[in-house]
């Protein structure tokens, strides 16, 4: 009887295992775009692993250092084993231009999640990765051709010209998030809360 109970408990733990989310941050990340979704993910019971380019403290945008703490990553981009995670989430911020866009390890991770049909969520400036991943020179094959997406206005050119996505801007002054199958994109910092809530909803529905 005790052995049967043990097997039953193992089965339950397997069925109700917390989704594992890989949260990507860059140096100079826009703080609400990390902390707002993080709070929502934790409340949902997700297991979060934060990844960064280097194994050192990651600072938020300089305008926010007095309001938000730095982040101590759990792992570096080059050490991530993508198959261990159910979803990948990218916070935005100016650091995306240096830590995300030219980084081959980031490109490989994003490509894995997109091609495997796993939940792939990008917010604000990080959405530009849909244009430059494996296509930084403009002569590669974009990973989200024809998909519906939104993103920060300053990366719209990357999305449309390089990424060949169908871009939507939403209504100015209101949060805006688009879901296209496994792909979730949020437009700007104002969309951080809705973005986090949408990621949770999509993951739970899968």
Image (cartoon, rainbow, N blue to C red):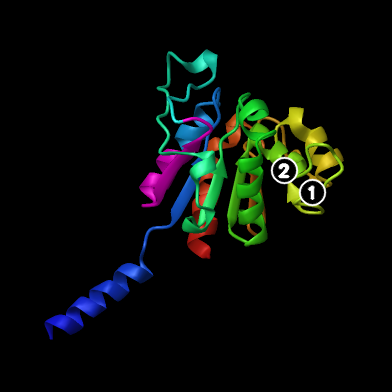
Looking at the picture, tell me which residue is in the foreground, 168 or 171.
Answer: 168
- Reading the image, the residue beneath label 1 is 142
User: Is 166 located above or below residue 53 in the figure?
Assistant: below
The residue sitting at the front extreme is: 78
The image quarter in which residue 93 lies: top right
Q: Which mark is residue 133?
A: 2
Q: Which is more N-terminal, label 1 or label 2?
A: 2
| Region in magenta | 37-54
The answer to whether residue 177 is visible is: no
Residue 124 in the image: state x and y as whole percent: 65, 34
The residue sitting at the left extreme is: 2
Q: Which mark is residue 69?
A: none
Asked which secondary structure carries label 1, the reply is loop
Residue at (61% x, 55% y) in the render: 113
Residue 130 in the image: state x and y as whole percent: 72, 44
Q: Is residue 42 magenta?
A: yes
Residue at (55% x, 49% y) in the render: 88
The answer to whether residue 29 is visible is: yes
Disc tally is 2
């Amino acid at each position: 009887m005790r052995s049967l109970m043990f097997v039953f408990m193992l089965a339950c733990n397997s069925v109700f295992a917390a989704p594992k989310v890989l949260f990507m941050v860059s140096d100079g990340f826009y703080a609400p775009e990390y902390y707002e979704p993080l709070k929502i993910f934790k409340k949902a019971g997700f297991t979060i692993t934060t990844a960064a380019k280097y194994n050192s403290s990651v600072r938020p945008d300089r305008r926010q250092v007095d309001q938000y703490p730095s982040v101590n990553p759990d792992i570096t981009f080059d050490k991530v084993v993508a198959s261990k995670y159910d979803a990948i989430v990218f916070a935005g911020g100016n650091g995306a231009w240096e830590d995300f866009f030219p980084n081959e390890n980031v490109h490989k991770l994003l490509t894995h999640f997109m091609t495997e049909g796993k939940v792939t969520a990008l917010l604000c400036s990080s959405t530009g990765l849909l244009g430059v991943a494996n296509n930084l020179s403009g002569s590669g094959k974009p990973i989200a051709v024809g998909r519906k997406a939104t993103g920060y206005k300053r990366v719209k050119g990357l999305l449309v010209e390089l990424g060949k996505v169908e871009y939507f801007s939403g209504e100015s002054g209101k949060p805006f998030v688009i879901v296209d199958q496994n792909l979730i994109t949020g437009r700007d910092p104002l969309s951080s809360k809705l973005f986090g809530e949408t990621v949770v909803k999509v993951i739970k529905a899968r």
